[in-house]
Image (cartoon, rainbow, N blue to C red):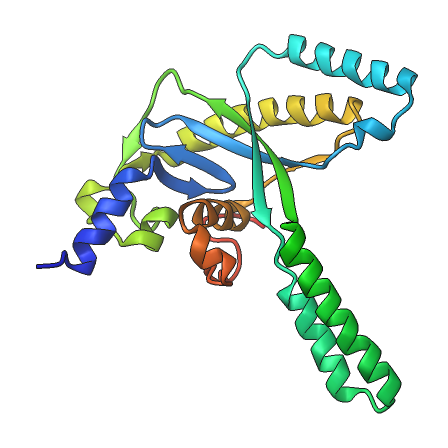
Amino acid sequence: MPPSSTARAKASQELIPIEEIRNGIVILKDKSLRVVIMASSLNFALKSGTEQDAIILQYQNFLNSLDFSIQFFIQSRKLNIEPYLDTLRDRVKQETNELMKLQTSEYITFVKEFVESSNIVSKTFYIVVPFIPGFVSFQKPSDISGVIGGLFGGRSKKEERVFAEEKFEEYRLQLLQRANVVIDGLARCGVRSVPLNTEELIELYYGLYNQESVGKGGAPEFVGRQGEQGK
């Protein structure tokens, strides 16, 4: 007999180490916190020798200046050009010039076949900054529920535990200070970076655990930034 949807949701949830995503902060089940920063790419090969040496030196200084650990994560995804091709197909339907229609149709075919044969992927770069509180205070939430829990099936109120609001804000500020150190250090290397907000974190983790559905456009739609205050 196949397991019920509730059982499957609970089993999936147990495999995910995330307790909650709140105000742009990831709270893990071990009660440690994470902020995820998305970084731009840098075409190192096109730099001159002097520029390359300067970047390497700045990067070395940046790593040596950190008194906490960080994690680099690169996400590779097959390039999805269907939205772009759909735009071109709509333009073909509206085009009155037969020559332009033909050329655009041929262009659509060329781009589609080229991307499929070349297996082009897009890469996104992330830095994960951790914070482990020395002391944790808990209380039962009244109106805040775990966002990830909402994706995979809710848990009963008895099972949910989150940081007390004042403690969470204290830890959040300390974690953001670390994030700013990383952002400033990367900026000196010529890399732009920005922390992900709650909605962006949900989409990121949903995509990591549901890669097939995201590839088919199955990512969830979110209205506003759940769990964020004053934004």
- For the point 71% across and 11% down, which residue is it? 60
Q: Is residue 190 left or right of residue 51?
A: left
Report the label total.
0
Q: Nearer the viewer, residue 179 or 51?
A: 51
Q: Is residue 121 left or right of residue 7?
A: right
Q: Is residue 29 left or right of residue 73?
A: left
- For the point 77% across and 15% down, which residue is it? 56
Query: In the orientation shown, which residue stands out farthest toward the bottom?
Result: 96
Q: Position of residue 148 (x, y in %)?
A: 37, 47
Q: Nearer the viewer, residue 213 or 204?
A: 213
Please, is residue 163 above or below residue 218 in the view? Answer: above
| Res. 200 visible in picture | yes
Split into 4 quadrants, where in the image is the N terminus? bottom left
Please, is residue 202 above or below residue 214 in the view? Answer: above
Q: Position of residue 170 (x, y in %)?
A: 48, 27
Please, is residue 211 above or below residue 108 in the view? Answer: above
